[in-house]
Amino acid sequence: MPDSFAFIIHPIDPQRDVSRKFPALGKLPVWLIDFLSLFFPPVFISEIKGIRSVANGRAIKGWFVACPLTPTRMMSLPPQVVYRKIIQTGRYAEKLGARILGLGAFTSVVGDGGITIAQNLNIPVTTGDSYTIAVAVRAIRQAAAIMDIPIENATVAVIGATGAIGSVSAQMLAPQAKKMLLIGRRMDKLKQVAHKVRAAGSKEVTTTSDISQITQAHLIITVTSAIDAIIQPRHLRRGAVICDVARPRDVSRQVVAQRPDVLVIEGGMVKAPGEVDFGFDFGFPPQMAYACMAETMALTLERRYESFTLGKNITLSQVSTIDKIADKHGFKLSGFRSFERAISNTEIEQIKAHSQKPSYNDNHLRGVNQSLVNAVSR
C-alpha cells in the first residue's frame, strides 16, 4: 500500500477561499456562503505530488479535501453537527486511499481537538499542533535575533495561553525570557498554565485576561480561536515582534498599515522537501505549507501512521519528537511571511530602523512603510 495522507482544509475567508475553487460561488454574500456551507458535501481540492524525503529519498502523495463549513458555522453550530461534517470529510479521505489524516484550522480545535474524529475513522488523525508549536517558537526566536531583541531581556506574551499551542509555546520560551505574560479568557486555567511555565524556568509570570497589557511585550505569540482580529495598532509597543499562529488571523491588517515599527510574521510556515506540487493555489510560494500540514506529511514520510497529536494536552516531548522527524526529512523554516506575502530583508531592515526611532506621531505612523501597506491592501 503506497505511503499517502490527506489533509482537511476549510474556507477561512469565505468569499476569497470559496472563489479559489468555485469562482461563481465566491461572489455570493458572506452570510449566504455561511448558511449554505452546512449543506455542501466534502469537496475534493487537489492531489499533492512530489514530496520527497532528503533522508532516504522516499516519496509520498496526498490529497487536500475540504470540509465546507466556515469558521462562523463551526463556532455557532452544536459540536456534534460539526463533528459529523468533519467525519464525513475524513471518510472521503479514506476512500481516496489516505493512510493518515491531518486536521486544518478550526477542524482541529472544535470540541475535543480531534479525539472524536479519530474515534469515528479507520485511519489515524493528527491536528498538527505539535509541529506548529515547534515552528512558531523557532520563528519568534529567529525574528527576535534579526530585530536585535535579546529574549533574556524581553517580556514575552502568549495570547491564547490556555490552549494546547499557547501553553506549550510558553513553556518552551520560559527558560529564556525575562518575563512571561500569559493572556486568556479563563483565569483558573491561566493559573494552571502559569504553574507549568514557572516550573519550566520562568523568572517572572503574569496572567491577565486584558489584551491591552501586551503593550509591555517585546515578543508576542498569538494563537486564539477568535473569528475576528483582536490585536490592533494601539495594543503594541514600539519594535514589537508578533508571530500570528491563529487562523483566522488575530492581528488586524491595520497593524501593518499604521505601525511600520512592528514586525508581524505568520506562524507555522515551512518549506516542504522535494519538487512539490500541491495542485492548488493557496496563495503560498512554491513548496511552502503550514506546519500543521507538514506534521501530517512528515509522519507519512516516517511511516509513523498514528494519531500523533490529539486533544488539548500536548507534551514537550511530542514537540521535540516531531521537530526531529520533520528536520530529518527536510522540512525547513524558510523566511518570513506577513498577510500571505514574503517579507524581504530590506523591509525587515526598514521596520528595524523605524523601531529604533525615539518617537512617533500619528501622521508618521500612517505615512511610512508604504510598500507593505500597498501589498497588504491588495
Image (tube, helix red, strand yellow):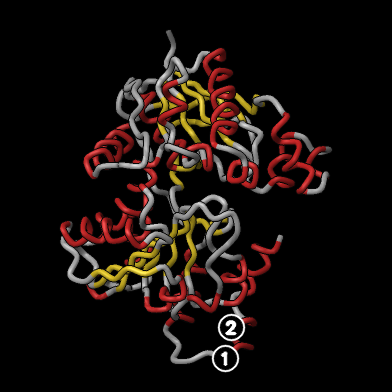
Q: Is residue 66 left or right of residue 160?
A: right
Q: Determine whether 326 is above or below 41 in the image.
A: below
For the residue pair 170 and 143, the one nearer the viewer reads as 170
Quarter of the figure with the N terminus? top left
Label 2 Cα neighbours within 10 Å, binned few <14 / some 14-19 / many ≥20: some
315 or 51, which is in the foreground? 315
| In-image side of 7 versus 367 (left or right) | left
* 253 or 117: nearer the viewer: 117
**Amino acid on which disc 2 is placed:** Leu
Position of residue 59 measured from the top left corner of the image (x, y, whole percent): 42, 21
What residue lies at 43% left-to-right and 42% top-to-bottom?
Answer: 291
Q: Which residue extends farthest top?
A: 1
Do the residues bearing badges 2 and 1 touch, measured as CB atoms within 8 Å? yes
Classify residue 285 by image quadrant: top right
x and y percentages locating residue 7 in the rendered image: 51, 29
**Percent coordinates x, y for residue 212 in the rendering:** 46, 75
In the rendered image, the vertical position of residue 287 relative to residue 4, given as above or below: below
**Distance from label 2 to label 1 (Cα)?**
6 Å
| Residue 253 location (% of width, % of height) | 61, 65
Residue 272 visible from this viewpoint: no
- The secondary structure type at the circle numbered 2 is helix
The amino acid type, in three-letter code, at marker 1 is: Asn
Residue 322 visible in the picture: yes
Q: State the residue at coordinates (83%, 45%).
A: 27
Residue bearing mark 1? 361
Q: Nearer the viewer, residue 323 or 276?
A: 323
Q: Identify the residue under disc 2.
A: 365
Which residue is depicted at the point 64% across and 88% down? 363
Q: Which mark is residue 316?
A: none
The quadrant where residue 52 appears? top left
Question: In the structure shown, which secondary structural element does the residue marked by tag 1 occupy?
Answer: loop
